Image: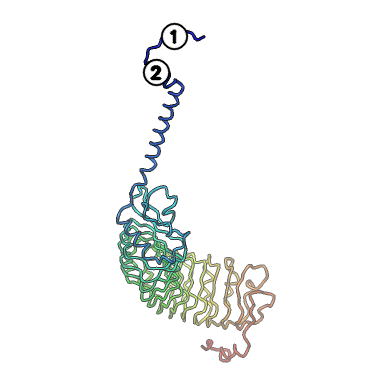
Amino acid sequence: MLKSHSFTPSNINHQVAMPLPNLNLHHHLLLLLHISLLISTNHISPIQALTSPSDISALKAFKSAVKPSSIPPWSCLASWDFTTDPCAIPRRTHFTCGVTCSPDSTRVTQITLDPAAYSGTLTPLISQLTNLTTLDLADNSFSGAIPSSISSLSNLQTLTLQSNSFSGSLPPAISNLKSLESLDISHNLLSGFLPNTLNSLPNLRRLDLSFNKLAGTIPKLPPNLLELALKHNSLSGSIPESAFAGLTQLEVIELSENSFSGTLQSWFFLLPSLQQVDLANNSLTGVEIPPNSGGDLVALDLGSNRIEGYVPVNFGSYPMLSSLSLRYNRLRGRIPVEYGRKKSLKRLYLDGNFLIGQPPAGLVTGGNGVSGSLGDNCLQACPASSNLCIPPQKPNAICKQAYGGGRGKPRS
């Protein structure tokens, strides 16, 4: 039998309608629902539109200029769905790659596409992305001209358009990109002349326009350049000293497979930071090598030119020189004995000339660590045991004809 208690009607109703344990559960559920709503609200708020409207319209124009049939479903551009904000975070399904934004998610700072064989053109409206620091479309199939409006990208530091099919000339307006540090438009179909205003790019460190159809000569180059690559074009004339004047930091020069002619003069080898030079496959007829003045030249390729005269002795005084190619020129005389004493030399190609006499013993004795070739010359007693003596020497008849009976220079 229950013990008697005194209850008011309200207490009795409350006790019957909602027992105390259920009251606690009810409050817990309400609290959890409230917390859930707060978390959900805070999670959604960053997805509100943040990107600059001009940037969004530029991105839309960029994608519209790409042929839809060239956009694979797995690619970066396929994820550019403008039903969401391009800079919104997190990016789980849309704008998953290809675009980088500023820390406050308001401006586009980088476009770096994947190599997905996109084809189309580069829209002139790219100029609206005024906070862009990197534009990288490498290894795709973009074509047409590079729009001159690109000059509006005053914050651009890296422009990489390599391995596409861009055509026309390099727009002179590109010289307005004062922040540009790296310019690579190699492996395209550019034609015409190099702009005379390239030297107005004060921060440019790397310039690569190789494998195009550029003509003319080299204009004055940017003052702080470290690497220059213009190989496999149709550049011609002599290599002008005025183009390289004041380039105290230039380390790498790649000018092979062009039509440069004349004599490569001594000023070229006095560039104070020069380390690697490739001038192979041109039409140079002479080279002036000054005594080493403390430079750091490591590798030099002058192969497949029309250089006449004797093998330059002064290369023996370049302390860092480890790779030298003078192959397939019109050199005559003997190989300087200094080459056989040079400890830094690891690769030497003198094949395809008209060199006579015996090779220096330091080159052909075993264990010297020198690779390369002295073959296809007119050398005597080049030991078959040395790999440097491959291929065989020229027939005596050709050597006698070249020297006109032992005197003079080889005939063309």
Residue 236, x across and y down, in percent: 41, 79
Residue 95, x across and y down, in percent: 41, 54
Q: Which image quarter: residue 11?
A: top left
Q: Residue at x 58, y 89 (%)?
A: 406
Q: How many marks?
A: 2
- Residue 13's disc is 2
Q: Residue at x 41, y 33 (%)?
A: 33
> Would you call the spot at circle 2 few (<14 residues within 10 Å), some (14-19), or many (20 or more)?
few
Q: Amino acid at mark 1?
A: His
Q: Nearer the viewer, residue 377 or 10?
A: 10
Counting residues from the start of the chain, the first of labels 2 and 1 encountered is 1
Residue assigned mark 1: 5
Q: Is residue 311 above or below residue 197?
A: below
Q: Which image quarter: residue 214?
A: bottom left
Q: Amino acid at mark 2?
A: Asn
Q: Residue at x 63, y 87 (%)?
A: 395
Q: Is residue 167 left or right of residue 392?
A: left
Residue 135, x across and y down, in percent: 39, 61
Q: Nearer the viewer, residue 236 or 21?
A: 21
Q: Is residue 187 above or below residue 392?
A: above
